Image: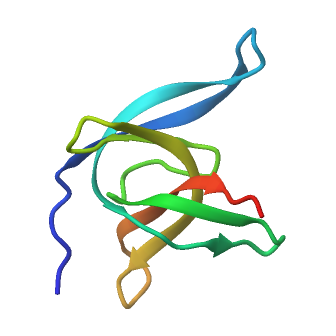
Amino acid sequence: MPKPPMKEDVQIFEPTGQIDKYGKPSYTEVPSKARVAYTTKVIETTDGNRYEPSLQVDLPPTAKIGYGFLVQWTNHFGEVIKDSVVAMEETLNYGGDKVYWRTVYVGKERRN
């Protein structure tokens, strides 16, 4: 069964590598279309850190995304959700040479 079309608007904040006068990194904003869904999973990395994402965002294959990027989405109630990328997945065809979409999990590090 195919996935529904990407009809949500998100903003992807790409780090520029520069730091402002307060020591925070500066970002450039890039708009994109996406499929957004709430999620309740815990992702554990190989170094033992646990992350609890709040959003699962499917992006088109042309969207530039990576760790350290921020994703902002406004839900249907007008609440703005903005957080960092904690995990990424790609959905490929059987040959592995075409990317259909990229799934990005957005959330925070979980404190035990």
For the C terminus, which image quadrant? bottom right
98 horizontally vs 8: left or right: right
13 horizontally vs 99: left or right: right
For the N terminus, which image quadrant? bottom left
Q: In x, y percent, where is residue 103?
A: 43, 66
103 horizontally vs 1: left or right: right
Identify which residue is drawn at 70% across, 13% down: 20
Q: Residue at the right extreme?
A: 47
Towards the viewer: 111 or 5 = 111
Identify which residue is drawn at 47% across, 39% down: 82
Q: In x, y percent, where is residue 9?
A: 25, 42
Q: How many marks?
A: 0
Q: In x, y percent, where is residue 63?
A: 39, 49
Identify which residue is drawn at 75% across, 13% down: 22
Q: Residue at the bottom extreme?
A: 94
Q: Quadrant of residue 45?
A: bottom right
Towards the viewer: 97 or 88 = 88
Q: Quadrant of residue 79?
A: top left
Towards the viewer: 90 or 22 = 22
Identify which residue is drawn at 17% across, 80% down: 2
Q: In x, y percent, where is residue 36?
A: 31, 57
Q: Residue at the top extreme?
A: 21
75 is higher (above) or lower (below) than 6: above
21 is higher (above) or lower (below) than 24: above
Towards the viewer: 27 or 61 = 27
107 is higher (above) or lower (below) than 87: above
